[in-house]
Image (spheres, rainbow, N blue to C red):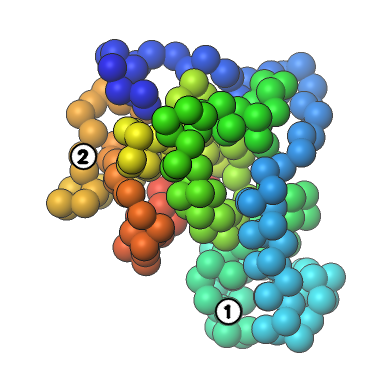
Amino acid sequence: MHPFYGADCNSKPVLRPTRVHARMGRPPREKPMPDQQKALDTQLANIQKKTGKTLAQLRALIAKSGLQKHGQIRDMLKSELGLGHGDANTLAHVALDPGSATVKSSSAGHDVGAEVDRIYSGPKAGLRSLHDAVMARIAKLGPFEVAPKKAYLSLRRKKQFAMVGPATKTQLEIGLNLTDSTPTERLLAVKQPAMCSAKVRLADAGEIDDELIGWIRQAYEQAG
């Protein structure tokens, strides 16, 4: 039985994301995971340093442009301020939703940090630093929800775009929901039906490279 997909690739997760309870009212905001929030705060600080403008001034600039769609705002920021794709993408999110400057956690009342500690306990504890490094890079893409499951974290926007968790004692696995992706020796197709379409395994922080982040970014954007 694979820890991500269950016996038949359709097993239900143990913990449900808070979004399931949206009909009952807005769920209380939980404390974000430190590594993700730190990465987002650092990215926003660097954006302000690069542009020489405060976050309030950047929001005013975007409002003055009259643009309403995320993609249009992102492209404007890239062309007018010379920002890279990741920075422009995050700033566009923050401009459209000021609350997105805080990473949201969703775990049906459970403490996300405690759940991560549980997932990486015992023989899998050695993968925790690799997990944190991956999550810090993903946090730079923009806001998303984190929903802990029995053996992994589900990362969601409008829908799930990635799953991060230990595959073995020495390998971390990232499951991705990608549309029209071409499998490679590294990006492996997942037999369907399943909760993701592709997966990548890594054992070292050096494998968190541009190729991997490119696949994750593609899944992130397709889930928005």
SS class, disc 2: strand
Q: Please identify the quarter of the rendering in which residue 167 is found.
A: top left
Residue 209 falls in image quadrant = bottom left
Q: Is residue 38 above or below residue 161?
A: below
Residue 146, located in which quarter of the rendered image? top right
Q: Residues within 10 Å of mark 2 (few under 14, many from 20)?
A: some
Of 30 and 222, nearer the camera is 30
Viewer-side residue, 171 vs 151: 171
Residue at x 42% of width, y 30% of height: 123
Q: Position of residue 23 (x, y in %)?
A: 72, 19
Left or right: residue 180 versus residue 81 is: left
Q: Which mark is residue 83?
A: 1
The disc at residue 224 is none
Q: Residue flagged by tag 1: what amino acid is it? A: Leu
Q: Which residue appears at 30% of the width and 45% of the height? A: 201
Residue that label 2 marks: 189
Whole-percent x and y of residue 181?
Answer: 25, 49
Q: Residues within 10 Å of mark 1 (few under 14, many from 20)?
A: some
Under circle 1, the secondary element is: loop
143 vs 198, left or right, is: right
For the residues carrying marks 1 and 2, which lies nearer the camera in this image?
2
Furthest residue to the left? 185
User: In which quadrant will I find the N terminus?
Assistant: top left
Residue 110 in percent (x, y) is at: 69, 23
* Residue 46 higher or lower than 21, as above or below: below
Query: What is the number of callouts on the image?
Result: 2
Residue at mark 1 to residue at mark 2: CA–CA distance? 33 Å
